[in-house]
Amino acid sequence: MSSPAPALSPAPLDAAAIRTDFPLLGERVNGQRLVYLDSGATSQKPQAVIDAEVDFLTRTNSAVHRGAHTLAAEATELFEDARATVAGFVGAQPEQLVWTSGATAGLNLVAYAIGNASLGRGAPDSARFALRPGDEIVVTEAEHHANLIPWQELAARTGAVLRHIPVHDDGSVDLNAAAAVIGERTRIVAFTHVSNVLGIVNPVDQLVDLARSAGAVTVLDACQSAPHLPLDLPALGVDLAVFSGHKMLGPYGVGGLYGRSDVLEALPPFLTGGSMITTVTLDEASYLPPPQRFEAGTQPVSQAIGLAAAVRYLDGLGMPAVHAHEKALEARMAEGLRAIPGVRLLGDAAGAERVGLWAFDVEGVHAHDVGQFLDARGVAVRVGHHCAQPLHRRFGLTASVRASTSVYNTTDDVDVFLDALSGVRAFFGAGA
Ligand SMILES: Cc1ncc(COP(=O)(O)O)c(C=O)c1O
């Protein structure tokens, strides 16, 4: 038998050329070339995305799924094509993708839909999602507030108990603790694919296995993975997952909720109103199947079309190449950060699979001062708790600095950032 062909590494990205596709990156900030290392908060947009939205608004703008006129039909076709494109990007079928206004909206949709099931609403098989007092919802200690507070609220409404899986000192999920926390009372396990503070790719398989053996529903926050690595949500085995358009080169105000077909079929709606019904009387209404059942009211149409352009752009680069590029930037950044005295990395787990994101503390200098110091040198980073207060508290911090990359970052960007950062402690009189 002949040996299998070796896996081909993707061709490296030409980030300097990619950068020219992003008009904002050509702007000067504080008189300097912009080094944008805040893509974890929101990414820049390529001209192709801007053009797609402007083109739709200029030439096709019309209400989707409603009018019988030509423009309405064309707008509907573009909107549904966008759904198919974005669904395909995460390995899903079009009917498995619900448009939302972003990941926060998607997670709240799921939590409120489960809350409605708990009130006895929905089709008979909605009962499988119903929470009773004492049932358990499990999250990790590393969640963004968007994947924490909706579950706190759901627990408060239903009498369920919210539990958490701790992370180790190196930021990796404590799988032994997970096995102890996830048990027969667990009904929901909601966790992030990649923490927006730690940058570590979490062991989805193992968490899904634990949740499945407990019969729990899994909800994945894929905000920080979808823009950075090849993603096949059905293959990951999660029941539901959310992602955010503005973090993946797309417009604001649009995101996706993926659901396994049988899960979406059984979930009751959260928002109700126009466009999600089949028949309405003055007393009651019946609902369309998913995804429309979860899309009450006017949808983010031009934004969805812009997001489809964004995923086409990413697909054009190739997600394996995107991931390889950002891993190389991450490794360069880590090496440089470790060499700067007084810098403590968060989530520095040996051998962990990562995306291009590092959060860190600078001894003796407040994160906001670090941010301003870098900003004056043209380097944009995020400072604060990054909507992850419990995780910061876990590490004894109230704030950190975060540098996060995307397809348009070059090794030069990383070097400019490291060079600037190496002077920050001396500037603030905090050490060498
Ligand atoms: C891990 C994670 N989850 C959820 C969110 C919220 O996403 P959105 O802005 O789409 O509501 C963010 C955004 O910062 C995030 O990083």
Image (tube, rainbow, N blue to C red):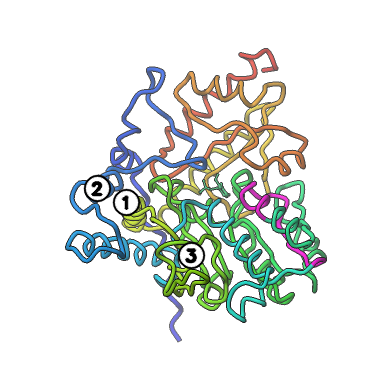
Disc number placed over residue 302 in the picture, else none: 1
| Residue at x-position 51% and y-position 42% | 40
Q: Are marks 2 and 1 in contact (CB under 8 Å)?
A: yes
Give the labeled residue for mark 3. Answer: 294
Amino acid carrying label 3: it is Phe
The region drawn magenta spans 133-150
Amino acid carrying label 1: it is Ser
Counting residues from the N terminus, which is met first, the one under dot 3 or under dot 2?
Answer: 2
Disc number placed over residue 354 in the picture, else none: none
| Mark 3 surroundings within 10 Å by alpha-carbon count, few (fewer than 14), some (14 through 19), many (20 or more) | many
Frontmost residue, 412 versus 305: 305
Q: List x then y, in percent, for residue 28.
A: 35, 23
Amino acid carrying label 2: it is Leu
Give the labeled residue for mark 2. Answer: 57
Q: Are marks 3 and 2 in contact (CB under 8 Å)?
A: no
Frontmost residue, 255 versus 130: 130
